[in-house]
C-alpha cells in the first residue's frame, strides 16, 4: 500500500521559507500516470491546491502562489519537496502531500488525489 | 470565494438520503472536466470518495454515488449513517484559474 510521510519544521518565522519533504513508500515515484503534490488546509477552513509535479520535471503551480512556490523531486530517494518563500500568518495550515493520478497523463481534467499523507501543521509565527 | 459552490451544510436523519450540490461554470465542470469528491471525517485526513464524476474507489460503500450534469455535480448519500457525519469537498480543474479547485465544503449533519 502506498504511503506518504511529510517531514519538516512545524514552526516558521514570518518572511522566512517554509520547507517540507514528502517520502514515498510502497510504490514507485516514477510512475507514468502519477504526479506528486501538496494541498493545504488552514485550521477550520477548506482545502487549497498548492501544486503538483511529475518525476520528469513537469510541474503545475497554484497561480496565486506561483511567485513563492518551488517544488522538486528526488527520484533516487523517493522524495519530493515544497519550498514556500516569504511566509505570513496566512500560510499557517495543515500541509498534506498527495499523489495525483491521471487516467491519461496528458489530461489534467481527469486527475484525482488518491493518496494523502497524515498532514503536518505548519504555524507561521515569530 | 470558491470557484465551485457548495452549500455550507446539509442534514438528515439516519436512513435518509441527502444530496450535496457542487455548482461550477463553463471553465470547470462545464468544460467536461471530471469532478471528484473527498470525505473528511472530523480530525482525520481527507480521503477520495468519488472520482470521475461517479466512480467509487474500492472500499467505498455503494451508498455513496456521484453524478454530473452541465455545470454542476452532485453527491448523494443514501441510507445515512452516523459515521457519515463529515465534511465533503468537490474538486475539479479550472481553465480560467489554471489549476485544480476545490469547493468550499459541505458539513453533513446526522440528526
Image (cartoon, coloured by chain):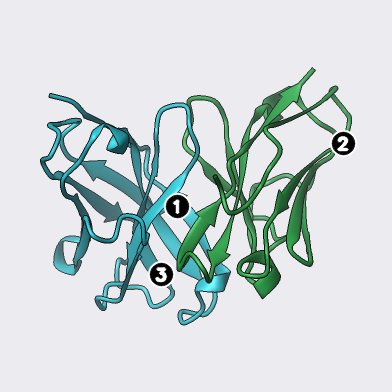
Which chain's residue wears label 2? B
Horizontal side of residue B1 vs B52, given as left or right: left
Q: Residue at x 54, y 65 (%)?
A: B93
Mark linked to residue B41: none
In this rendered view, identify the residue nearer to me: A126 or A122.
A126
Mark 2 burial class by Cα count in 10 Å: few <14, some 14-19, many 20+: some
Number of on-image labels: 3
Horizontal side of residue A79 vs A111, given as left or right: left
Gap between marks 2 and 3 measured at Cα: 35 Å
* Chain identifier, cyan in the render: A
Gap between marks 3 and 1 measured at Cα: 11 Å
* Chain identifier, green in the render: B
On the image, which quarter does residue A123 sit in? top left
The local secondary structure at tag 3 comes to strand
In this rendered view, identify the residue nearer to me: A57 or B7.
B7
The local secondary structure at tag 2 comes to loop
Q: Residue furthest top?
A: B111
Mark linked to residue A115: 1
On the image, which quarter does residue A7 sit in? top left
Q: Nearer the viewer, mark 2 or mark 3?
A: 2
Q: Which residue is mark 2?
A: B17
Q: Residue at x 28, y 61 (%)?
A: A66
Q: Which residue is mark 3?
A: A34
Decide: is B90 above or below A99: above
Amino acid at each position: 500500500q502506498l504511503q506518504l510521510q511529510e517531514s519538516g519544521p512545524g514552526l516558521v518565522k514570518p518572511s522566512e521559507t517554509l520547507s517540507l519533504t514528502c517520502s514515498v513508500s510502497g510504490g514507485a515515484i516514477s510512475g507514468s500516470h502519477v504526479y506528486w503534490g501538496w494541498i493545504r488546509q488552514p485550521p477550520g477552513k477548506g482545502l487549497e491546491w498548492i501544486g503538483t509535479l511529475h518525476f520528469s520535471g513537469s510541474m503545475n503551480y497554484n497561480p496565486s502562489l506561483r511567485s513563492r512556490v518551488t517544488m522538486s523531486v528526488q527520484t533516487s530517494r523517493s522524495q519530493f519537496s515544497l519550498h514556500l518563500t516569504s511566509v505570513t500568518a496566512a500560510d499557517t495550515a495543515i500541509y498534506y502531500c498527495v499523489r495525483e493520478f491521471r487516467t491519461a497523463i496528458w489530461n489534467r481534467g481527469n486527475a484525482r488525489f488518491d493518496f494523502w499523507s497524515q498532514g503536518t501543521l505548519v504555524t507561521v509565527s515569530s | 470565494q470558491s470557484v465551485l459552490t457548495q452549500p455550507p451544510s446539509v442534514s438528515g436523519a439516519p436512513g435518509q438520503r441527502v444530496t450535496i450540490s457542487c455548482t461550477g461554470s463553463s471553465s470547470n465542470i462545464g468544460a467536461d472536466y471530471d469532478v471528484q469528491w473527498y470525505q473528511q471525517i472530523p480530525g482525520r485526513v481527507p480521503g477520495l470518495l468519488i472520482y470521475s464524476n461517479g466512480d467509487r474507489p474500492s472500499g467505498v460503500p455503494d451508498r455513496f454515488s456521484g453524478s454530473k450534469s452541465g455545470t454542476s455535480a452532485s453527491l448523494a448519500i443514501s441510507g445515512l449513517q452516523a459515521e457519515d457525519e463529515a465534511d465533503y469537498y468537490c474538486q475539479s480543474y479550472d481553465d480560467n484559474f489554471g489549476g485544480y479547485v476545490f469547493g468550499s465544503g459541505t458539513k453533513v449533519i446526522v440528526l
